[in-house]
C-alpha cells in the first residue's frame, strides 16, 4: 500500500481539488470498501457538506468536514483520486464520487477494492481506539528511543508496526536499513544506542526527502530510493549483491556484506 510520502501526495491533491467546495451530490457506485457506514448513508451524510481541512497520520488520510466529522481514506494498494468535469474522464474503477457545485467531480478510483473508507465521528477517539502510533515525521528522537528500548523483536518488525510508529512500510523500512548498513532482521536488544539514533535520523531524512518530491506509486524515477530491491542485483554500494528473505512476515531485501546483522 502507499506509504507516508505517497499518502501525503494524495493529501495535497485532495486539498487542491476538494477543500472549501460544497458537495452538491455524493454518489456511491460500490460500497464494498466502506467499513462502518453503508453506501446510502455515506451519500446522505456527505451531500451538502464541505471539506474544510485535512489531516494525515502515517499512512492514514482524513478529510475534515464542516460539521467536525471526518472521512478516513485508506488507499489500499492501487487507489487514487481523480478530479474531472467531463464524464468521459470518469475513472474506470470509480467506487464513489463527490460532485461539487462548480460542476467538477472528485472520484475515488480503486481497482482492487483494498481501500477502507470510514466515517469518523470523533477523530481523537478513533486514533486512540486503533492505537495508531505517532507519525514517523513527528516522533521525537527521545520518544523513538523510549519505544525501542527493552524490546527484543526484529528491527523491521518494530518499524513496520503502526502502533509503534505510523507511516513506515516495507519499502522505506528496507531503504532505511540499507542506508544504516544494518540487517532488517537485527534484534532490537542487540543494536547499540548509537546505531538506534542513526536509524531514527535516516528514517526521518528519507521520509522527508521523499515527501518533498511528492511521489506517486504509478511512476517513480529510475533512481528512486529502494529501486535496488531486486534479488541478485548489484547493490548501490557497487560491491554487494542484493538478497531476498522474509522478516516479520514480509518479503525483505538486503545487501549481503554491506548490512550487519546484530
Image: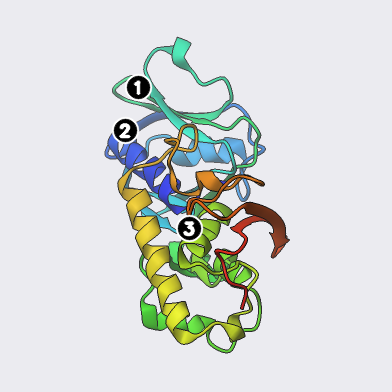
* Mark sitting on residue 104: 1
The residues bearing labels 3 and 1 have C-alpha atoms spaced at a distance of: 27 Å
- Of residue 242 and residue 1, the one placed in the foreground of this image is 242
Discs 3, 1 touching: Cβ within 8 Å: no
Asked whether 242 or 35 is in front, the reply is: 242
Rendering coords of residue 118 (x, y %)? 55, 49
Relative height, residue 154 to residue 111 (above, below): below
For residue 216, what is the image quadrant? top left
Residue in front for this viewpoint, 244 or 122: 244
Q: Choose the circle earlier in sequence order: 2 or 1.
A: 2
Rate crowding at label 3 as few (under 14), some (14 to 19) or many (20 or more) other CA atoms within 10 Å.
few
Residue drawn at point x = 42 percent, y = 35 percent: 221
Would you name the residue on which mark 3 appears? 121
SS category of the residue bearing label 1: loop
Q: Is 244 located above or below residue 190 in the figure?
A: above
Q: CA distance from mark 2 to mark 3?
A: 23 Å
Badge 1: how crowded within 10 Å, few (<14), some, or many (20+)? Answer: some
Q: Which residue is mark 2?
A: 17
Residue 9 image offset from top left, x and y in percent: 38, 42
* Residue positioned 31% across, 33% down in the render: 17
Amino acid at each position: 500500500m502507499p506509504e507516508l510520502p505517497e499518502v501525503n501526495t494524495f493529501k495535497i491533491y485532495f486539498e487542491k481539488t476538494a477543500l472549501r467546495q460544497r458537495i452538491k451530490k455524493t454518489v456511491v457506485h460500490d460500497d464494498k470498501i466502506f467499513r462502518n457506514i453503508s453506501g446510502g448513508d455515506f451519500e446522505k451524510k456527505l451531500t451538502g457538506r464541505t471539506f474544510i481541512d485535512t489531516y494525515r497520520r502515517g499512512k492514514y488520510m482524513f478529510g475534515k468536514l464542516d460539521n467536525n466529522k471526518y472521512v478516513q481514506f485508506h488507499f489500499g494498494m492501487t487507489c487514487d483520486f481523480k478530479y474531472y468535469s467531463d464524464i468521459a474522464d470518469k475513472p474506470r474503477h470509480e467506487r464513489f464520487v463527490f460532485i461539487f457545485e462548480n460542476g467538477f467531480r472528485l472520484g475515488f478510483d480503486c481497482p482492487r477494492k483494498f481501500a477502507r473508507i470510514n466515517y469518523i465521528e470523533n477523530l481523537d477517539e478513533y486514533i486512540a481506539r486503533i492505537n495508531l502510533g505517532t507519525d514517523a515525521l513527528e516522533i521525537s528522537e527521545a520518544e523513538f528511543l523510549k519505544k525501542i528500548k527493552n524490546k527484543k523483536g526484529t528491527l523491521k518488525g518494530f518499524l513496520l508496526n503502526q502502533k509503534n510508529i505510523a507511516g513506515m512500510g516495507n519499502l522505506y523500512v528496507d531503504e532505511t536499513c540499507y542506508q544504516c548498513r544494518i540487517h532488517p532482521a537485527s534484534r532490537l536488544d542487540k543494536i547499540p544506542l548509537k546505531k538506534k539514533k542513526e536509524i531514527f535520523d535516516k528514517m526521518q531524512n528519507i521520509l522527508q526527502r521523499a515527501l518533498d518530491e511528492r511521489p506517486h506509486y504509478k511512476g517513480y524515477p529510475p533512481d528512486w530510493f529502494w529501486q535496488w530491491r531486486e534479488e541478485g542485483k548489484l547493490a548501490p554500494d557497487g560491491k554487494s549483491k542484493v538478497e531476498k528473505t522474509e522478516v516479520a512476515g514480509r518479503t525483505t531485501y538486503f545487501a549481503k556484506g554491506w548490512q550487519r546483522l546484530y
